[in-house]
Amino acid sequence: MKIVLSLIICSALAGECKPSFQHKDVFEDWSSCMYQGYNNSIQLLNVMGDDYINQNKIFIKFYCKEIEEKQT
């Protein structure tokens, strides 16, 4: 099995989330996907900055999902 990571940026102020977006890499195991999810969340928060995060009450959700490998 391969695993994909999807991230979702949400605003508690607006009470909504943007559509999820999928990380470009596919992972070999669950822990690699989870670590990347947390790392990407921190990177996104750093890019947004404290003012934007505080004004919009931003939070980030993510999930890892197993996918079937295509047989060739």
Image (tube, rainbow, N blue to C red):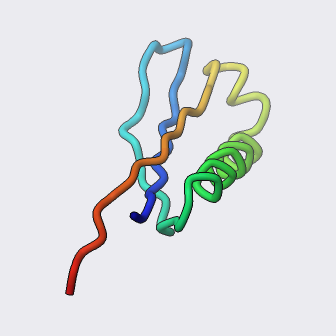
Q: Nearer the viewer, residue 1 or 60?
A: 1
State the image coordinates of residue 60 (x, y, percent, origin top left): 59, 33
- Residue at (47%, 14%) from the top-left corner? 14
Asked where in the image residue 72 lies, by quadrant, the reply is: bottom left
Residue 63, compared with residue 12, is above or below; it is below
Q: Quadrant of the N terminus?
A: bottom left
- Residue at (62%, 25%) from the top-left corner? 58
State the image coordinates of residue 13 (x, y, percent, origin top left): 55, 12
Residue 37, compared with residue 13, is above or below; it is below
Q: Is residue 30 left or right of residue 3?
A: right
- Residue at (71%, 40%) from the top-left corner? 45
The residue at the far left in this view is 72
Q: Nearer the viewer, residue 57 or 72?
A: 72
Q: Is residue 44 left or right of residue 24?
A: right
State the image coordinates of residue 29 (x, y, percent, origin top left): 56, 61
Q: Is residue 57 left or right of residue 1?
A: right
The residue at the far bottom in this view is 72
Residue 10, compared with residue 32, is above or below; it is above
State the image coordinates of residue 41 (x, y, percent, origin top left): 66, 43
